Image: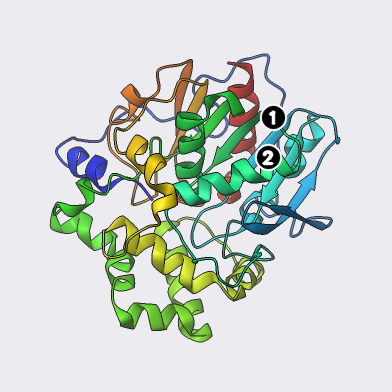
Amino acid sequence: MISRRTFNAAMGLSTGAAAASLAGLQGVSSAAPALSTAPGAHTSFPSLKQVKAGLLEVGYAELGPAHGPVVICLHGWPYDIHSYVDVAPLLAAEGYRVIVPYLRGHGTTRFLSSRTFRNGQQSAIALDIIALMDALKIHKAVIAGFDWGSRTGDILAALWPERVKALVSVSGYLVTDRKGQLEPLPAAAEHTWWYQFYFATERGKKAMEDHDHRLQLTRLVWDLVSPTWNFGDATFARTAAAFDNPDYAAVVIHNYRWRLSVAEGEPRYDRYEEKLATAPPIVVPAITLDPEKDPFTLPGNGSMYRDKFTGKYEHRTLTGIGHNLPQEAPTAFAQAVVDADRL
């Protein structure tokens, strides 16, 4: 989700920026390929793979030619790789090697050691992706993501720009500012973040550890943050299966508690967090996407984070689309990946 400091600053601005429709995306080159698929056209990936990478054995889907240019698609919370079930075939058809990993604590991704702390802090997740790229012998890739995936992509582009060919980031610049998150927001904004505060309590932790409560909570989040997405029970169930990972609750709870400084991180990540605390700019070519119906979308058509992208850059707002943008608007997301790669 977006930075609370950025959200706070945005509360004083009015909306009204020009938005691009899916049929005529702002800034799309006329030379771009005519990517098109209906949301929900695919329900599964052909197969899943596993690879040892850093602290994890990572489960991931892979589509496209083995030697094609690489795109790594990163999911958010409470979602999984199925957010890209329609995006990946589109990109594979354009010649990309598409890697869609389960983040730590999700799906078939497992910690290699029972002694490893189930850490959800932002730099730990970013380093997981660096380790995955190393394990797969991928030197450089286009990184595309939303929610936790946007944050991870932003961090990779900011701290390891030599590994990122281009970036697609839904909701813009999402690097967490823990100091900023200590300040209160206007009541309406605080209300939007209700689950984050719930997770700071033992009651919220128990809810995430309990299967039925976990499903009820995550399904409610889907409904609230994607109000125009007409998904069915089967679509949710395919993703919710990833929440049965034995480390899911621990990673999710630590992620949100760490953001609010209710829980500490690990010293091994201090040097990365110190760099991220300076809000480093992103110099690689980037396209940011704002889903209009997402309650976390800032007013201003990307203006609140524009100065953080100092390389080649485009911004697009997608009308009628909610938080899970890749699954709700796969054609627009895939097109943004192709266009970012060409910036």
The total number of labels drawn is 2
Instruction: Indicate which disc residue 133 carries.
Output: 2
Image coordinates of residue 193 in percent, x first then y, are 29, 60
Secondary element under disc 1, as helix, strand or loop, is loop
Question: What residue is shown at x 13% (from left), y 53% (from top)?
Answer: 186
Asked if one can make out residue 316 in the rendered structure from this viewpoint, the answer is yes
Question: What residue is shown at x 41% (from left), y 58% (from top)?
Answer: 225
Q: Based on the displayed image, in which of its 4 quarters is residue 192 positioned?
A: bottom left
Q: Quadrant of the C terminus?
A: top right
Side (left or right) of 131 relative to 260: right
Depicted 102 relative to depicted 27: above or below: below
Q: Camera-side residue: 59 or 231?
A: 59
Image coordinates of residue 178 in percent, x first then y, are 26, 49
Depicted 102 relative to depicted 30: above or below: below
Report crowding for label 1: few under 14, some 14 to 19, many 20 or more residues within 10 A (C-alpha). few
Asked if one can make out residue 164 in the rendered structure from this viewpoint, the answer is no
Give the amino acid type for the residue marked by disc 2 in the picture: Met
- How was the colour assigned to the protein in this rendering? rainbow
Gap in angstroms between the C-alphas marked 2 and 1: 7 Å
Give the amino acid type for the residue marked by disc 1 in the picture: His
Secondary element under disc 2, as helix, strand or loop, is helix
**Label 1: which residue?**
139
Report crowding for label 2: few under 14, some 14 to 19, many 20 or more residues within 10 A (C-alpha). some
Question: What residue is shown at x 21% (from left), y 59% (from top)?
Answer: 190
Question: What residue is shown at x 36% (from left), y 62% (from top)?
Answer: 256
Q: Camera-side residue: 227 or 239?
A: 239
Image coordinates of residue 197 in percent, x first then y, are 27, 68
The reply to whether the C-beta atoms of the residues labelled 2 and 1 are less than 8 Å apart is yes
Image coordinates of residue 272 in percent, x first then y, are 41, 40
Q: Based on the displayed image, in which of its 4 quarters is residue 6 positioned?
A: top left
Q: Camera-side residue: 188 or 282?
A: 282
